Amino acid sequence: MIVLTPLKKFQFPVHAECINPDVFKGKSVKEIAALPVWEGNKKKKLSDIFKIEETPAETPDITINGDATEVRRVGQGMKNGEIVINGNAGMHLGEKMAGGKITVNGTANGWTGSSMKKGLIEIHGDAGDYLASPYRGSTAGMRGGTIIVDGNVGGDSGCYLRGGTIIVKGNAGPFLGFHISKGVIYVEKNAGGRLGASMTGGKIVVSGAVDEFMPTFTVDGIKKKVKIDDDFKAEGPFYVFLGDLAEHGTGKLFVSQPSNPQFSAIYDKYL
């Protein structure tokens, strides 16, 4: 196992896509130390910004001990192995990830899991905006894998989702699941406005309250439980909505009935 410890508090963003089990594999500590990174506009070696140690433990492959908020692109494109970050993680964590596992014992910044294809990301804290979402102007959203967030997530999370599962144990910001076509998003607590806007498929489940509801969804019934993955079913009852009809969508929104009594007078007469 390789252990990385920041040598200082970073004042500028550090682009370190080389922090990847696939890149480290087969390399000596000396070779790993020479890997290139960018701190701001200056090209440096990994050993210039991290203390690098090797331990006998086989897993995880890489451990980062300390605040890595400014360290971006850790685990980008990784296909195998495991990374553990004992602290906060920077932007683009696990971007285009195709396998393996990343654990963050802290918070994670924006675009975590962007365009993810496979693997598992666990965040034992909050996640920033654009979780699992593509860059602005792109429609290449998350296609597979699983992201679990113990805390809250920011706005525009799960946009253009095309597969995979996102589980949020806290609250979600606005525009959750914008334009999703496939996959599952589950929020254990509350969700912000414009939930599921422009969705054409997939499934969004909210066990808490929703700030507002778009008029381009039609109520379809009540469901007692909803399957999130093979190991977990969310307990309802849930209102079931179909849409987004403005996009001729066939997606499903499952919104907690007990947590949203304001919907009773509007929708119950149609059920």
Image (cartoon, rainbow, N blue to C red):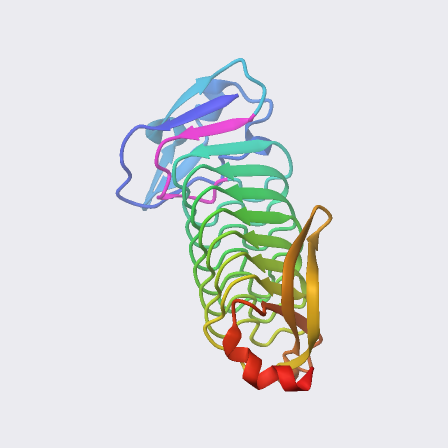
Relative side of 242 to 19, left or right? right
Say whether residue 62 is magenta: yes
Using the image as rendered, state which of residue 77 and residue 131 is in the foreground.
131
Using the image as rendered, state which of residue 271 and residue 70 is in the foreground.
271
Say whether residue 68 is magenta: yes
Above or below 94: residue 253 = below
Q: Residue at x 45, y 34 (%)?
A: 85
Using the image as rendered, state which of residue 101 and residue 261 is in the foreground.
261
Above or below 123: residue 188 = below
Relative side of 145 to 103, left or right? right
Where is residue 129? Give x, y as percent.
43, 59
Write the start and end of the magenta stretch as one range: 60-74
Using the image as rendered, state which of residue 223 and residue 57 is in the foreground.
223
Where is residue 36? Give x, y as percent.
43, 34
Residue 101 shows in the view: yes
Above or below 188: residue 3 = above
Outermost residue toward the top? 56
Residue 215 shows in the view: no
| Secondary structure that dominates the magenta span | loop
Q: Residue at x 39, y 36 (%)?
A: 87
Q: Residue at x 58, y 19 (%)?
A: 58
